[in-house]
Image: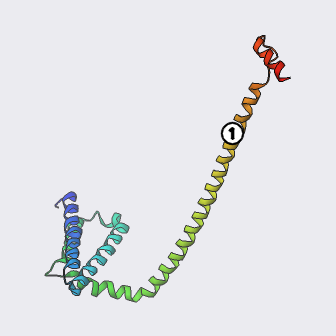
Amino acid sequence: MIGALVTRGLTMLLGYAYPAYECYKTMEASRSEIEQLHFWCQYWILVAVLTILERIGDSFISWFPFYGEAKLALFVYLWHPKTKGANDVYDSFFRPYVSKHEPVIDRSLSEFKLKATDAAFAYFRRAASYYQTTLFDILLKFNTHLSTTAAAPKAQKEPSTHSGNEEEKEEEAKDK
């Protein structure tokens, strides 16, 4: 075994970085060859599917001996110029499966989009209602606080009956 850290590093380099760079070069070439671009699209579709399947089944398959090394070998097989495995895997397995189930997949995606849109609208309505209520409560407390503070100085200006201060008595006389 090479080691999990080294295997993950090589998988990132040879499974993602190098193919991404090759895809970039193909797209940016002055005259992109459609076949080469088609190949890299097949590669990235397969990598996406493998990544999703791996995330779902990681706890079941990652403990197999040499799992990381097998994954690395699969990635290299998919893009290597001598094997061009992406063409074989895509044409033999992926395309026939997806073509057979395409109407079901499309219908499921449409239903999911509708449900997600409805859920998003319901969530935003609840959030708007919550924030509206919260804002109203804050404004009400602020208004109550302002009216309490405004009433407090009036109470302080009322004359004091127990004070012996001459100036206060004079002010009381002026007010009457």
Image vertical order of residue 99 relative to residue 14, above or below = below
93 or 143: nearer the eye?
143
Q: Look at the image and name its color scheme.
A: rainbow
- Residue 169's x, y, as percent? 80, 15
Secondary structure beneath label 1:
helix
Left or right: 150 as drawn, with respect to 176: left
42 or 123: nearer the eye?
123
All told, the count of numbered labels is: 1
Q: Residue furthest left?
A: 82
Q: Quadrant of the N terminus?
A: bottom left
Image vertical order of residue 154 relative to residue 3, above or below = above
- Residue 77's x, y, as percent? 19, 77
Quarter of the image for residue 122 reads bottom right
- Residue 79's x, y, as percent? 20, 77
Q: Quadrant of the C terminus?
A: top right
Residue drawn where x is 15% and y is 80% of the image: 81
Residue drawn where x is 69% and y is 46% of the image: 140
Residue drawn where x is 21% and y is 83% of the image: 32
Name the kind of residue labelled 1 in the image. Answer: Leu
Image vertical order of residue 172 relative to residue 106, above or below = above
- Residue 10's x, y, as percent? 19, 64
Left or right: 168 as drawn, with respect to 119: right
Left or right: 33 as drawn, with respect to 49: left
**Residue beneath label 1, please?**
146
Quarter of the image for residue 162 reads top right
Residue drawn where x is 76% and y is 28% of the image: 155
Q: Residues within 10 Å of mark 1 (few under 14, many from 20)?
A: few
Quarter of the image for residue 40 reads bottom left
Image vertical order of residue 148 relative to residue 80, above or below = above
Q: Residue furthest right?
A: 176
Left or right: 48 as drawn, with respect to 176: left
